Structures are given as structure tokens and as C-alpha cells.
Image: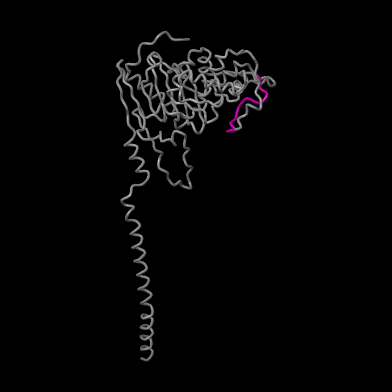
Amino acid sequence: MFKSALGVAVSLLAFIIAAPAAEASTHSTKSTQKKHSVKKSPARHKASPSHTARHHVAATATPHHAKHKSGYQHASYSPSHVAPAAPTTPDVHTVPPVMTAGDLAGLNLTHDPLALKSNAAVVVDQTTSQVLFEKNSGVALPIASLTKLMMATIVVEARQNMDEVLEVTSDDIDRERHSASRLSVGARMTRANMLHIALMSSENRAASALGRNYPGGLPAFVAAMNAKAKALGMNDTRYVDSTGLSSQNVASARDLARLVAAAYQHPVIREYSTDTHYTVNTGIRGRQLQYQNSNRLVMSPTWEIGLQKTGYITEAGRCLLMQTRVNGRPVVMVFLDSKGKDSRLADAGRVRRWLEVSKPQALRPSVAHQG
């Protein structure tokens, strides 16, 4: 009996000691829950940055339609207010997307009915010079190797000896991006062959050598490129080299359409830029190199392409310009800052289908095909 009474007393004493601790623990838990509740409450009423950006796109990307006296329909698409996409916190397990100059300027917020993947584009009737479709076409952007079309225009119009043999030197090595080249230092070939592979396959060392071997050297060559741009009314254009490797080579899609029209007047540029394959002798132990066109559309029997040039650097995205014929009518297409390796080619297909179906009135019967 004494042991039973003692056990009850011990149990009662333990309860008295434990009760305040349990009450303190319960109070602490309730306080913590209350704090979490306070933090969560505003989040239910605040839109996330990505939602805000999506709402901004819907509100600002606006089409502009105009009917000209000639009766053709002109569609233009551009954001009414350019704003960069809202920043997001990168996942440690994912690689952040590469932002081009167009993305940083907010051009990726522009939507168009053709769902183009290019941030900027323009479609021009070559016969009438009328703009049929445009998307951010007046914005100056890096143009990568589209620069080589102006390079070729300067070389051809300078009437330099196309049979003169030029040599690749260490000055032609890309020290800015460290890009690869199939032409070794010491390779020697004619100016014509240098121009051929520069236009057809975007050979950078060939384009550099062509610029260096201009009267007055590369500085004079770049000055001639900028002077030609000014003469053509390419007011959004600036060149700093002959290759396009620098992101400071910039132009608008509208300017490049003017350049296509001018360069198209030279048969050699049309021929070299649309050739599918070409073999050159480098002059080094008889070594020959086989090149193919960087634009596979020229190999397609469903396309009739009279001039073309591709381009790519990180800041510029995928770029393409070309002269083609749709339903037998000449059209100039320019696409800048496209996403994905084949997206610029897909954009060209989207535009062609649109032209075939809509048949804009600006597309008049073609004149005699040049060349």
C-alpha cells in the first residue's frame, strides 16, 4: 500500500513539472503557424513575374494594317512598348537560355499571325519595292555573316582582279570568338575562289583576306562598306569588319532588303551565293577542300532562289536573307534573330505559304528574269 501511494505521488509530481513545458511547446507551435500564415496571405493576391510579363505581351504586341493607294495590303507588327522579359531565378540543374540582342530589347514579345520564330522580318515585292509584311523591320540588330553580302558587293564593284592569288595570314585568324576555319594560315587561292566560299559557305578567313587585300587595307574596306550602305539609304546599318564576327555589325531587316536588291544586280554574287557545292585548291601540298552551301533550301527543287546568305553569332541568333520567286514573282525575304537551327528556314516556308494563299496585290506579274 505504501508503494502504491508513493507511485501516485511520483506520477503527480512528474505531471506538475511537464505541464508548463507542454504548454510552452504548444504556444510556440501556434506562433510559428501564425507567422507562416501571415507570410502566405499576400502571395495569394500578387501576380508572379512571369504572369505579369505574359499579360504585358497580350496588351502591347499590336498589329498595324494599312491599305495603300495601289490597293495592296501591308501588315506590320511591332510591340507598342518594348520591355525586357521579367527575370526568373535559374534552376541549378538547367542551363539559362541564351539571350540575343533582340531578346534583350524585348522584341521577343512581338507576336504575328504567321507565328514566325524570327524577332525581326520583312518581305518585299522586288518588282515594286513595296513592303508586304514586316515585323520589327526598322530595328538595328547584329547581322552576323549577312555582313558578307556587303563585303561581296564592295569586292565586285571595286573591279579588282578576280584571278589574283591571295594568301591567308595570321591576321585572318578570329581572335574575338576563336571560331574554327578550314583554311589554314598559308592557304593560297584566287580572289574569285575566296569570294565563292565566303558567300556560299560563310568562310570567315576568306572574307577577312578579301577585306585586307583591298586598296588601303581593311580600314579602307570597312569605310567603303559604310559608304555604300549610306548610298543605298541603309540608315540603320553600321559595319566594323568584313566577316560579321563582330556583334557591332548591325542593320535593320528593312536595310538588308535594300542591300539584296542592289547585290542582285551582280551575276557573280547570284551565282556564288546559290552554288550548292564547290571545291577549292588551297595551294598547300595540293590539298583540296570541298564546301557546300550553308543554306540547304538552295538544294531543294521546290525553291527557286536567286541570291541568299545565312548568318549566326550568339548575339544575332539565326539570320537569313534571300531573293526567291513565289508563283513566278520575285520576292525578297529577310529574317533576323531566329531561334533554333532550322527556324529561319521554317520561317521562309511560312512566308511562302502565306504569299501563295493570300496573293497580296503588291505581287504583280514578273518582269523578265535576270540571269
Q: Is residue 30 magenta?
A: no
Quadrant location of residue 88?
Answer: top left
Q: Nearer the viewer, residue 364 or 252?
A: 252
| In this picture, residue 70 sits left or right of residue 194 | left
Q: Is residue 186 magenta?
A: yes
| In this picture, residue 120 sits left or right of residue 222 | left
> What number of labels is visible?
0
333 relative to 25, above or below: above
Residue 152 at what x, y percent from top left? 54, 18
| In this picture, residue 309 sits left or right of residue 64 | right
* Residue at screen point 53% across, 13% down: 268
Q: Nearer the viewer, residue 108 or 231?
A: 231
Residue 84 at what x, y percent from top left? 41, 39
Q: Main secondary structure of the magenta part?
A: loop
| In this picture, residue 248 sits left or right of residue 80 | right
Task: Please report the bounds of the magenta region as a residue range.
Answer: 176-188
Quadrant location of residue 355?
Answer: top left
Residue 304 at what x, y percent from top left? 44, 16
User: What colour scheme governs how the chains and residues are painted in the rendered image of this protein?
Assistant: one colour
Q: Which residue sits furthest right?
A: 285
